[in-house]
Image (cartoon, rainbow, N blue to C red):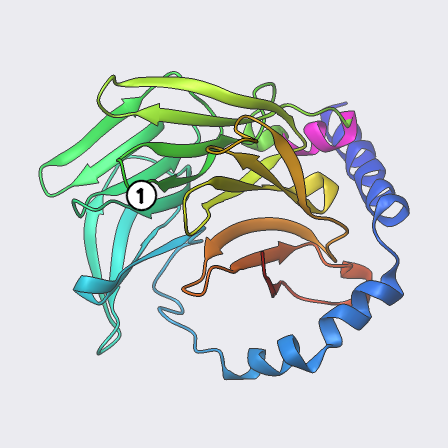
Amino acid sequence: MAPISFLIACLLAFTLEIFFSPPVSSSAALLSNSKYSSSMKDLIKLGEGCVNHPEDVSVVVRNGALYTATRDGWVKYFILQNETLVNWKHIDSNTFLGITTTKEGDVIVCDTEKGLLKVSEAGVEVLDPNVRFTNDVIEASDGSLYFTVSSKKYTPAEYYKDLVEGKPHGQLLKYDPELEETIVLHEGFYFANGVALSKDEKFVVVCESWKFRCRRYWLKGPRQGRLESFIEHLPGGPDNINLAPDGSFWVALIKVYVIYGMQDRLLKQRE
């Protein structure tokens, strides 16, 4: 019975994606824009065959290194100057998703089962063991950590149930390292995924994969505490998001009309 239920759920999910996604023509036109698509041919693959399903990356400029966490429990980094891969720390886990690096040089890892982890030369510390399905995280200049929980109801293995149910179970949270406390800033996201801080740290952008959009949550100023639209009708479900040096954002898209054989793409969206 379980395989049949799973098949039905997958068919429903695929049907919903076809009928409730933006028109294929407009999406294809956006991705074919030479401003974006022409840059894809210059991409260089790093660590091909040496990293097991890396979900996210974080660059430490002063060290010239790019960190990632893999599904076989490794936190690794590339020395960008010579593209050397270093196996840095191994953790007994296969449920890593998003990561970020801190100003102290530590790595914060979202573990969907163990919670929010801090990985350093001294070892591994669980910052908050009470959160599950953590997806992405970013550090502010004051050391606070903003992170997402994709679904407070379902596990990663049950993501398709979250999609088929069609209700917003995602969360945006903040971890205070001084108080060692986590608070929920906002709920009601349709599969909260990537998160990024604006350059001036006045707001965070949260990716909503099931709605093909990103929303902005204000941290400071007269609109503090308000949630607003940032970009709508993306040609795929937004996954990870990173701040660019010029204040714009890089957003990775997933499930971009598989019926047309399109692969994951990157889209740069200015503020």
Q: Is residue 147 above or below residue 70?
A: above
**Residue 241 in view, yes or no:** yes
The magenta segment is: 159-165
Let me know if residue 160 is in the magenta part: yes
List the single residue furthest toward the front: 222
- Relative placement, left or right, of 165 versus 225 is right
- Relative placement, left or right, of 34 versus 222 is right
Return the residue nearer the eye: 9 or 129: 129
**Residue 114 in view, yes or no:** no
Return the residue nearer the eye: 93 or 44: 44
Which residue: 37% across, 49% down? Answer: 70
Q: Which residue is mark 1?
A: 73
- Relative placement, left or right, of 136 versus 166 is left
Which residue: 26% across, 18% down? Answer: 180
Give the image location of residue 237, x and y in percent: 68, 49
Q: On the image, which quarter does residue 251 sit in?
A: bottom right
Q: Of helix, strand and loop, which one carries label 1? A: loop
Counting other residues with Cα less than 10 Å from the Cα at mark 1, is it few (<14), some (14-19), or many (20 or more)? some
- Relative placement, left or right, of 250 versus 104 is right
For the C terminus, give its image quadrant: bottom right
Return the residue nearer the eye: 90 or 251: 251
Kind of residue at badge 1: Gly
Give the image location of residue 190, x and y in percent: 68, 32
Secondary structure character of the magenta stretch overall: helix
For the N terminus, give its image quadrant: top right
Give the image location of residue 120, x and y in percent: 16, 41
